Image: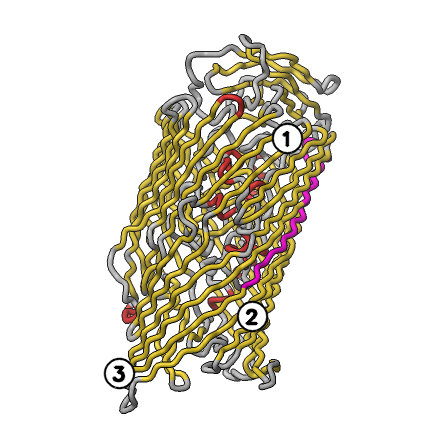
Amino acid sequence: MKRFYIIIAILCSFVTANAQMGLGGGGSTTVGKISGTAIDSLSKKPMDYASVGLYRSGGKAPITGVITDEKGNFKLDNVKPGNYKLVISFIGYPSKTIDPVLTTASKPDKNLGAVLISPGAKLLNEVKVTGQASLVENHIDKIVYNAEKDLTSAGGNASDVLQKVPLVSVDLNGNVAIRGDQNVRVLINGKPSGATSASLADVLKTIPADQIKSIEVITSPSAKYDAEGSAGIINIITKQKNVSGISGSVSGGFGTRQNNGNFNLNYNKNRFSLSINSGGNLTWPQTSLTDFKQDFQFGSYHTAQDANGTSRVKRYGTLSSITANYDFNAFNNVSSTFRYNKGGFNTNGSTLTQKTDFNYLTNPDSTFSYNSSSLGHNSFGGFDWSLDYTHKFKKEGHEIIISTQWSRSKIVTDYTTIFTPEKQTDQKNNIDGINNEYTVQADYTLPINKILKLEAGGKEIIRRINSTSDIFDPSGNGDFVFDALSSSLYKYNQNVTAGYSVLTFTLPKSYSILAGARLENTAIHGDPISAGQTDLTPFDNNYVTFVPSLTVQKQLTPTQTIKLSYSKRITRPSLTFLNPFLNTNNKLAQTIGNPILAPEVSQTIEFNYNTFIKSSIINTSIYYKRTQGLIENLAGRIFVEGQPGTLSTFQNAGVNNSFGASFFGSINPIKIITIRGNLNVYTYHPTPYAQYEQFFTHTGTFVQYNAFLSASVNLPSGFIAEMFAVENSPRHTIQGESPSFSIFGVGARKQFMQKRASIGINTLEPFNKYKHFDSNIKSPGFTQSSTFAFPFRSVGLTFSYSFGKLTFSNPNEKKKGVNNDDLKQGDQGGGVGGGGGR
């Protein structure tokens, strides 16, 4: 019934809006193009990467835009007959305005020929990224990192790129955080992927960096976005170009750590366009070292465990997509994308463990040791298939978009552990998870007048997940037999129904306001089945969430902007957190989910200041964030078969209040040098609920940070060099801290063939073969510490080549379609969960 009320509210918004303005439609279906070539008036050379904007004649808001190619050519397609104004911008040049530019139904195409642009002494007063876009851009609702301009990322993967993005940090295991919070939703081209929602950390390591165009970070999403993700949203934009004719690129890298390649092909003729992208990543086998210590205290019983081991890992992955787009006319468009991913990793490890028991009643101290050998096979793959329809009305900006998507993913985790001598039972476990996610949504936009714009929409997400865990016991002759009592099946259904409305006000004196509200209803049904745990019963968990958002922005001068924003977000517990099945695969480290977990609720207030000083950018923010119902993994002591162990489960355990400040900037001390940096500092101060106070053994106020610094040099003859450093502080939890993380890299690249081709060399951690990471956990009667050493030193060669005639689409064009971003991804390394949405 709640879902019905939400849909009715959305329809009422549509009816009300159209009653005010009328539905519109129809009109001439004739479209044409405006083309030309930007030329420097003094040197007579073409101006590549100049910004070309198209406006209504006398208008102030751009309708569309492109970037000139390497020969200065530009072409604006799908232009309806009318009177226009063309503005060409380039850093260091006054803007060139041509007004009017007239096209008619009988002569829809307009070739302006050579457009001469004279150099000027001052930059444009209207500050926006023009010409060659800067590495970092700041928009009213997001920060954009233009990864394709970062030469040290070539030859790496998505995790390598994310380490350099402002406000984002990536830990040793590949877990992604925004401002230290790992409750992040990651999208690809504005849409979810079944793979990223289930095994984010592993999938990111399979995406070649050469396939990434830019990364968007949204810290205060409006009500248009799904309420999930307390930290915010990361949107990875891949290289898909809107081109005339045929063009493409091929790139790759070979190195001592990993190898990758990427191929892109684009075709555009008249109203049809097609884009194909395929890339892969393969790492060389890498051996890591571990040192693990545990200490238990049970009254007079005390035991200590010390383990040392090695693990050899080899990863592989591929991500491919095909996108087709067709314009029926100027008012109707349909597009479809099919994305396929496949990846995995294999592990081979061995560990020597020594255990010592002290003062066990009257028995003397005893020490024994054993070896364990493990083999693991992990794979993940699936597809996302989306279909979007857009209808534009007569009024500029008035449109409705209907989007659908089907995502399917499969994750396989198989492992076998053999103990010698047999101090524990040999283990074999095969886990298969299948996730089907179906989404349908509608988004409606209506510019009511020059001051007010209305956006409204509705959405339904249907998730159907099956997870099977098959346990096998040793038969005594070296084989394993199926154990039906210990095996389990988990069926998980989740439906999310949502409706939203957002109002944008453009006010006098350079004020703008973005205000919105979203209502979501979540219905969960779980059915755990196990022959050995007959007390398991189906469960339901339903809740309604109201999510308001507000942003107020003031442009102080053409180069300075301030912004105040408020957002409310939730973090839904996913399948891994809710499964009530008691996992005893490791009898000394048992886990169990909590089916009655409530979502985390966070509220953030942020004040932001942004300024441009010539070619330099400075952006700084201060913020306060309060999170209620913290979902924490609490480890307590248990006693199993005469040995101490741990039982871990998830609870809504407390509240966290965090104050923080962030800064990023870019300066050019001299023309050929660019220095960039970002710093985020924030506090962590958890307060437990009374019933969980005993588990909060690591309390107080902790200051945490993540920082990035880089410098690049542009030399004559197409030579570019860059170096960077990343530093992340230890991340504190209620029972300990996870390791700090740092990395240093250097790269150089040579461009030739009029910047169509390049070769380069990169190196990471040239002075350290291994990076060491320390972590610790403490709870009543139990302490644990570990040291993990991972090989990081690497050297690689990279190459790229582009072909065809490129006419880039507007880089600020709004992404359309399904955008699910609504599940907790704290468990970024595995499990089968849902995806996330706008």
Query: Residue 442 appears at what percent x and percent y?
Result: 60, 47
Extent of the magenta region:
322-347
Earlier in the chain: of badge 2 and badge 3, it is 3
Left or right: residue 256 versus residue 302 is right
Mark 2 surroundings: few (<14), some (14-19) or many (≥20) residues within 10 A: some
Query: Residue 811 appears at what percent x and percent y?
Result: 55, 32
Q: Secondary structure at mark 1?
A: loop
Of discs 2 and 3, which sits in the foreground?
2
- Name which residue type carries label 1: Lys
Can residue 270 be seen here? The reply is yes
Mark 1 surroundings: few (<14), some (14-19) or many (≥20) residues within 10 A: some
- Provide the residue designation for mark 3: 299
Q: Residue at x 57, y 82 (%)?
A: 474
- Provide the residue designation for mark 2: 415
- Name which residue type carries label 3: Gly
Q: Nearer the viewer, residue 159 or 514?
A: 159
The answer for how far apart the CA atoms under marks 2 and 3 are is: 35 Å
Q: Secondary structure at mark 2?
A: strand
- Provide the residue designation for mark 1: 394
- Name which residue type carries label 2: Tyr
